[in-house]
């Protein structure tokens, strides 16, 4: 099998931030997957699963109600590694263009009194939520984004160096 694009990102050098994971063409339209990374992979503890679930609900609700972006949101959901989220949008914005929106979405978590969509009819694991921990992680990410707003590393993936074989093929060691 061909190695997928996201596995070419050097996770040992990655920092939290807002990154373009991939851009796909669907007919005449583009769809962009963004990596909203809250934790340094393999170097920081991952996000608590119940807090991750609450962040998913709160921020998905925020994005799908934000007049600037709501019609372009295709998906907001957690990464399996629990270090961040994927945001899939119609169109192709730069990570810098999303900075304000992502900052506002995570800031909005603080004002939430209850996690939306947590009734048994609305959620497949309605008891697995932790709003207070979600607020902790949201505040941590907001502080980080503000402190690093001028740091280009929060907008550009670190790429792994790959060797070329004698016949021009890329060598992948995993």
Image (spheres, rainbow, N blue to C red):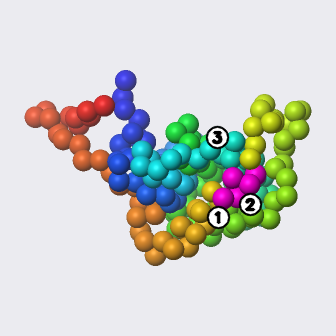
Looking at the rendering, the stretch of residues picked out in magenta corresponds to: 131-136
The foreground one among 157 and 26 is 157
Q: Counting residues from the N terminus, which is met first, the one under dot 1 or under dot 3?
A: 3
Is 124 drawn above or below residue 109 in the view shown? above
Looking at the rendered structure, which numbered label has been put on residue 151?
none
In the rendering, at what x and y percent does residue 173 appear?
26, 33
**Percent from the top left, x then y, of residue 73?**
69, 51
Q: Earlier in the sequence, mark 2 or mark 1?
A: 2
Instruction: Residue at 50%, 53% (x, y): give it.
Output: 39
Residue corresponding to mark 2: 109
- Is 113 situated left or right of 55 in this image? right
Q: Residue furthest top?
A: 1
Which residue shows up at 74% across the image and 54% down it?
A: 132
Q: Which residue in the protein does label 1 denote?
A: 139
How many numbered dots are placed on residues in this image?
Answer: 3
User: Is the Cβ of the residue at disc 3 closer than 8 Å to that at disc 2?
Assistant: no
> Residue 28: in sight, yes or no?
no
Prevalent SS, magenta region: helix
Residue 164 horizontal side relative to residue 31, left or right: left
Labelled pair 2, 1 in contact (Cβ < 8 Å): yes
Instruction: Find the distance from the CA under tag 2 to the CA under tag 1.
Output: 8 Å
Residue appearing at x 40%, y 54% in the figure: 14
């Amino acid at each position: 099998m061909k190695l997928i694009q996201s596995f070419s990102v050097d996770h040992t050098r990655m920092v939290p931030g807002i990154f373009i994971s991939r851009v796909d063409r669907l007919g005449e339209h583009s769809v962009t997957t963004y990596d909203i990374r809250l934790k340094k992979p393999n170097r920081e503890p991952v996000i608590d699963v119940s807090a991750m679930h609450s962040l998913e609900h709160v921020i998905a609700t925020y994005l799908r109600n934000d007049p600037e972006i709501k019609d372009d949101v295709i998906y907001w959901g957690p990464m399996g590694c629990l270090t961040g989220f994927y945001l899939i949008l119609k169109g192709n914005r730069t990570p810098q263009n999303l900075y304000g929106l992502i900052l506002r979405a995570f800031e909005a978590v603080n004002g939430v009194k209850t996690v939306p969509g947590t009734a048994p009819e609305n959620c497949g694991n309605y008891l697995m939520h932790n709003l207070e921990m979600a607020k902790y992680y949201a505040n941590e990410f907001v502080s980080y984004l503000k402190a690093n707003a001028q740091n280009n590393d929060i907008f550009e993936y670190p790429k792994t160096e790959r060797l070329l074989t004698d016949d021009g093929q890329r060598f992948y060691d995993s």
